[in-house]
Amino acid sequence: PGSGYSRLTVGQLKAKCAELGLTKSGRKADLVARLEAQAAVSVAEASFELRDEFHVGDKVMALLEEEEEEYEAVVQCNNGDDTYLISWTEDGYEHTQKAENMRLLKRAEKKFQFSAGDKVEGLYHEEDTWYPARVKCINDSGSYTILWEDG
């Protein structure tokens, strides 16, 4: 049950290394080991992506079912039940979306993280206005409980 790389010629191994952006120098055993290590990393990354498909801040294309169209959105929260709270890029409205109806456009550059006590601005949806607030706590879902500054 090997990878099959050992059956390839040195020329074929070097070509495969070049295709994957790996170093092409070394003996056949070195090339085989390098390719097998890369294959193991790829499998591990793929299984990680399946377990934790979307992150807060990721840009996605999400299906708006009633229009049968995909629109760009940003992931706001993982609801923990294979759904995500997203906000549509076009109008900022929030929507709960199934993971199966989303596809990744761009991974968030860094994960958003606030701490209890941080000064923030929160969107008060009823007025569609941002107000000063402080983070009270981080919820298990990745969302935040905030306290409005004005009481």
Image (spheres, helix red, strand yellow):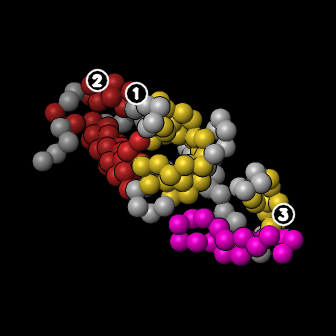
Separation of marks 3 and 2 at Cα, in angstroms: 63 Å
Q: Which of label 3 and label 2 is nearer to you?
A: 3
Q: In this view, does 55 lie above or below 59?
A: below
Q: Is mark 3 on a helix, strand or loop?
A: strand
Residue 11 position within the rendered picture, expressed as x and y whole percent measured from the top left: 28, 23
Label 1: which residue?
18
Judging depth in this view, the residue of 21 and 81 nearest the camera is: 81
Q: In this view, does 54 lie to the left or right of 90?
A: left
Label 2: which residue?
11
Of labels 2 and 1, earlier in sequence is: 2
Residue at 57 percent across and 65 percent down: it is 142
Q: What element carries label 1?
A: helix
Amino acid under disc 1: Ala
Residue at 79 percent across and 63 percent down: it is 120
Amino acid under disc 3: Pro
Q: Do the residues labelled 3 and 1 touch (CB within 8 Å)?
A: no
Judging depth in this view, the residue of 45 and 121 nearest the camera is: 121
Q: Which mark is residue 132?
A: 3
Amino acid under disc 2: Gly
